């Protein structure tokens, strides 16, 4: 393993230098090759989609009603730049997080209530009453305020 100073100055690799770098070079080449294949296949797929939409090809389905990827990208850019988009996304994410929080906490609360009461029937009827109250509240909001799911 000892290498002379003259060998180091001449740039001759040591035993360690010749043994280790082969594996990382091979891994880099393999990783680059798979990335290149992925990028190439995606590029070909997008080019074929663009051509099929522009010239309205008819394969398994007709491309006359399918927009080209350039049109889709322009529409996405316009949508993302609109001020309403971030408000709607924030509102949706908030609703999802509230729903997941309820789903995560409710089993523990129901279990604790069941253990405290000693009966599962009381817990079940309390849940049914809560759901009926929730449905009634949603119906009142829908009729009075005009706020509804999809209406």
Image (spheres, rainbow, N blue to C red):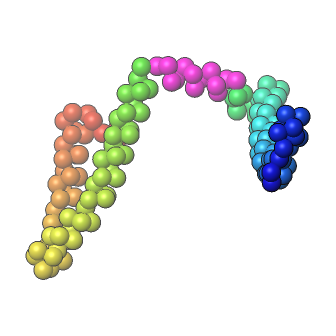
Left or right: residue 63 versus residue 117 is right
Query: Residue 72's spot in the image, x, y percent?
Result: 64, 27
Vertical arrangement, residue 102 with respect to residue 61, above or below: below
Q: Residue at coordinates 27% horizontally, 35% vertically from top-left? A: 147
139 is higher (above) or lower (below) than 76: below
Front position in the image: 140 or 106: 106
Tell me the quadrant of the picture where the C terminus can be found: top left
Pick whichever, 112 or 22, lies toward us. 22
Residue 38: in sight, yes or no?
no
Could one spot residue 89 in this view of the protein?
A: yes
- At a point 30% along the width and 47% down the height, the residue shown is 98
Q: Which residues are magenta?
A: 70-82
User: Is 20 on the left or on the right of 122, as rendered?
Assistant: right
Single out the residue that lies furthest toward the bottom: 118
Q: Quadrant of residue 67?
A: top right
- Residue 49 lies, with reference to residue 3, above or below; the image says above
The quadrant in which residue 36 appears is top right
At 11% across and 74% down in the image, what residue appears?
116
Residue 85, given in percent of the width and then of the height, sits at: 44, 26
């Amino acid at each position: 393993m000892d290498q002379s100073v003259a060998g180091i100055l001449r740039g001759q690799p040591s035993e360690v230098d010749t043994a280790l770098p082969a594996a990382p070079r091979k891994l880099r080449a393999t990783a680059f090759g798979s990335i290149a294949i992925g990028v190439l296949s995606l590029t070909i797929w997008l080019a074929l989609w663009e051509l099929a939409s522009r010239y309205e090809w008819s394969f398994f389905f007709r491309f006359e009603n399918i927009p080209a990827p350039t049109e889709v990208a322009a529409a996405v850019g316009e949508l993302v730049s609109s001020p309403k988009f971030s408000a709607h996304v924030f509102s949706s994410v908030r609703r999802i997080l509230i729903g997941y929080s309820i789903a995560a906490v409710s089993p523990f609360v129901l279990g604790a209530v069941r253990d405290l009461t000693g009966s599962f029937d009381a817990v079940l009827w309390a849940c049914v009453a809560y759901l009926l109250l929730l449905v009634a509240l949603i119906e009142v909001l829908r009729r009075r305020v005009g706020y509804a799911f999809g209406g």
